[in-house]
């Protein structure tokens, strides 16, 4: 492990606490039928614990070419370990499974792109069983934030529309090498049943638009007639709307056939 010098630009902070690693993997609740995709295995700290619990297959997607030999050597005896030598954003998860199969997506995410990776999950709802991620605590707090709080942002609404979010635990910086500047947290995201939004991309742009100039009343962005139809007061600000309000307004706007 120590042969690899951590690379800051790839967000490399390797987990060094066996206890934390075990707790994360406990959350994945691995069975022999599981298809697991790990984002950013690094030198394989989480990977090893996942493989010890014997999933059907573990795809580990890593961008850093220098860790490939380490991973290949360390896990050569595991026939269920597949290293995908790629940027996660270039991987088509749909190609890794057959009909009706689902993926447990996990990882100690690179913090510089963690929000983008989480948002990306909103576009893969139909194939995700759940996600277990280590992220910055401040991002985790956004994921669980309620309206009228400072943490309630675009990310809160977008993710809470599609996922039940569970805050598993905070993880202090000393459990990583090198220690990140911030405290971390483990979260579990489980796709909701009965999601009514079909056009996720449009919804994402819609929520993002309403959060621009978040102090402005929403009537400056959406016609009052539509807000009334959605049963939402036009004088409210985006940060005061519930997730259900966002969904209702979106549906009214979508179904407007003028
Ligand atoms: C925080 S480290 C976690 C490493 C290891 N899983 C652990 O917990 O010790 C993040 C890992 O993600 C990798 N990574 C960064 N950007 C990536 C991307 N776009 N696609 C795939 N892997 C990426 C980094 O090289 C690094 O190995």
Image (cartoon, helix red, strand yellow):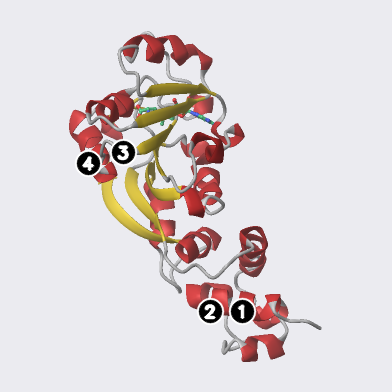
Residue to which mark 4 is pinned: 26
Residue to which mark 3 is pinned: 33
Distance Cα–Cα, label 3 vs label 4: 16 Å
On residue 245, which mark appears?
2
Image quadrant where one finds the N terminus: top left
| Mark with earlier residue (3, 4) | 4
Distance Cα–Cα, label 2 vs label 1: 6 Å
| Mark with earlier residue (3, 2) | 3
Image quadrant where one finds the C terminus: bottom right
Residue at the right extreme?
A: 258
Q: Quadrant of residue 70?
A: top left
Query: What kind of element bears circle 4?
Result: helix
Q: Is residue 2 above or below residue 108?
A: above
Distance Cα–Cα, label 2 vs label 4: 35 Å
Categorize mark 1 by other alpha carbons within 10 Å: few (<14), some (14-19), many (20+). Answer: many
Residue to which mark 1 is pinned: 249
| Mark with earlier residue (4, 1) | 4
């Amino acid at each position: 492990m120590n042969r690899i010098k951590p690379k800051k630009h790839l967000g490399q902070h390797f987990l060094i606490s066996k206890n934390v690693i075990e707790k994360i993997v406990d959350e994945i609740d691995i069975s022999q039928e599981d298809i697991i995709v790990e984002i950013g295995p690094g030198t394989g700290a989480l990977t090893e614990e996942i493989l010890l619990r014997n999933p059907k297959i573990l795809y580990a997607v890593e961008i850093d070419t220098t860790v490939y030999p380490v991973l290949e050597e360390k896990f050569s005896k595991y026939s269920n370990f597949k290293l995908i030598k790629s940027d996660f954003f270039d991987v088509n998860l749909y190609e890794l499974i057959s009909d009706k199969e689902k993926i447990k997506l996990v990882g100690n995410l690179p913090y510089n792109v963690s929000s983008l990776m989480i948002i990306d999950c909103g576009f893969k709802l139909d194939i995700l069983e759940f996600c277990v991620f280590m992220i910055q605590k401040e991002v985790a707090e956004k994921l669980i934030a309620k309206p009228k709080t400072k943490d309630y942002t675009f990310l809160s609404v977008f993710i809470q529309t599609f996922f039940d979010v569970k805050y598993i635990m905070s993880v202090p910086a000393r459990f990583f090498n090198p220690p990140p500047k911030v405290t971390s947290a483990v979260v579990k995201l489980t796709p909701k049943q009965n999601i009514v939004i079909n056009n996720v991309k449009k919804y994402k742009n819609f929520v993002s638009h309403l959060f621009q100039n978040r102090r402005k009343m929403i009537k400056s962005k959406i016609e009052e007639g539509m807000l009334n139809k959605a049963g939402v007061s036009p004088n409210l600000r985006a940060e005061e709307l519930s997730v259900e309000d966002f969904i209702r307004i979106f549906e009214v706007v979508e179904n407007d056939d003028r």
